[in-house]
Image (cartoon, helix red, strand yellow):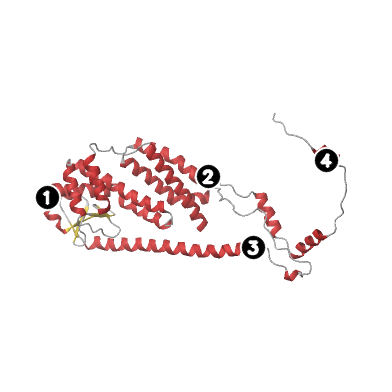
Amino acid sequence: MLPLVLEAAIRSMLLVVAIWLGLRVLRVRNPNIEMAAWQLVLLASLLMPFLIGWAPVSLPSNTLPIPQFLLPDLATSPAAVVAPVAPLIEAQSVGWRAVATSIYLAVAALLMLRLAVGCALTWRLCRSAVPIRGRWTEGHDVRASAVVNVPVTFGSTILLPESYASWEMVKRRAVMAHEGAHVARGDFYVLFLASINRAIFWFNPLAWWLHGRLADLAEERSDVVAIRDIGNRPRYAEVLIDFSSKADQAASALSMARPRTVRRRVERILTETTLPRDMDWKAWSTTVACILPLVVVAVGAMAQGPSRNDEKDEKKITALDAETLIQRRKEQRRPRTEVQIDPAILDNYVGHYQLG
């Protein structure tokens, strides 16, 4: 299992690097297009172990096609023949592989457990929160809780702090537009899949980067919706700064104002003058058409490996028993007779190749 996961991680890394370079070369600044691209990459990364398991691929072989043996001395008996080196190396590699697999499974299980516990605690928090009924909720599942200090989204539930009642109408509209965009676009579920991908490929730094990038793009897209709704960039920037000063994100929830990203988001809100366009079916089709060939190349890339004939010869040699090895050793030690020949005879074997 571990070699399959490692190969999938390497191919996913190459895919992430290729997409990142493509976005930089094309100077894509639309967060909707970037989000669509990275969502496709996330889906390909999660399916990569299954895809390469189905595709006929092989990893490069670092071993010689013909194993070396410790040949016994003539005086030794067949029972005292030393075992070939290849099985010994294989046994040692199996031992290290078992240790590496155990470490991988332990870390992956710990991250999965952390994700499950966080979701369970946040779900309990949502169930214990007080439902809010009002025309301004726009039909969303909105609840108030004393535990959270900033608006957060968990699944299709929007959690607000108890101080929401004192908010002015513009601030309330901005919050509902922002969090409602998360719910409508399913950003929580995208980040949930990204967390699973991060737990599976925890040793891959790009898996952690992909999770953070998806979270940042989700916030950028929701900022665009909120600005479009209230029509006031400076006022919305003030709302983000106000929330960032008391941010206390609930476990496994999508917070509106993460302190790590607020400064960058505020600078972008105040410097940009136009809002990015939304994705339509043409933009989605173009994005899929550009990324799908790279996914196919990442999945179907063949690596140089030992041929079938080499594998057959290796199996044939390793299958030799002790008696056969002793007989071959005796044959090698038999006296040889030197035969003199005319060097001119070798001229008959001299030739050349000519291209047509």
Q: Three-letter amino acid code at disc 1?
A: Glu
Q: Are marks 3 and 1 in contact (CB under 8 Å)?
A: no
Q: CA distance from mark 2 to mark 3?
A: 30 Å
Quadrant in the picture for the C terminus:
top right
SS class of the residue under badge 2?
A: loop
Q: Describe residue 188's horizontal placement relative to residue 128 as left or right.
A: right
Q: Residues within 10 Å of mark 1 (few under 14, many from 20)?
A: few
- Which quadrant of the structure image shows residue 87? bottom right
SS class of the residue under badge 1?
A: loop
Q: CA distance from mark 3 to mark 1?
A: 75 Å
Q: Which residue is mark 4?
A: 346
Of the pair 155 and 261, the residue shown nearer to us? 261
Which of marks 4 and 3 precedes in the sequence?
3
Q: Three-letter amino acid code at disc 4?
A: Leu
Which of marks 2 and 4 precedes in the sequence?
2
- Residue in view at x 77 percent, y 62 percent: 324
Q: Which residue is mark 1?
A: 168
Which of marks 3 and 2 precedes in the sequence?
3
Q: Residues within 10 Å of mark 3 (few under 14, many from 20)?
A: few
Q: Describe residue 114's horizontal placement relative to residue 350 as left or right.
A: left
SS class of the residue under badge 3?
A: helix
Mark 4, mark 2: which one is toward the viewer? 4
The relative height of residue 104 versus residue 219 in the rendered view (above or below) is: below
- Residue in view at x 44 percent, y 45 percent: 15
The relative height of residue 73 versus residue 245 in the rendered view (above or below) is: below
State the image coordinates of residue 16 (x, y, percent, origin top left).
42, 46
SS class of the residue under badge 4?
A: helix
Q: CA distance from mark 3 to mark 4?
A: 43 Å
Q: Which residue is mark 2?
A: 301
Q: Are marks 2 and 1 in contact (CB under 8 Å)?
A: no
Q: Which residue is mark 3?
A: 87
Q: Residues within 10 Å of mark 2 (few under 14, many from 20)?
A: some
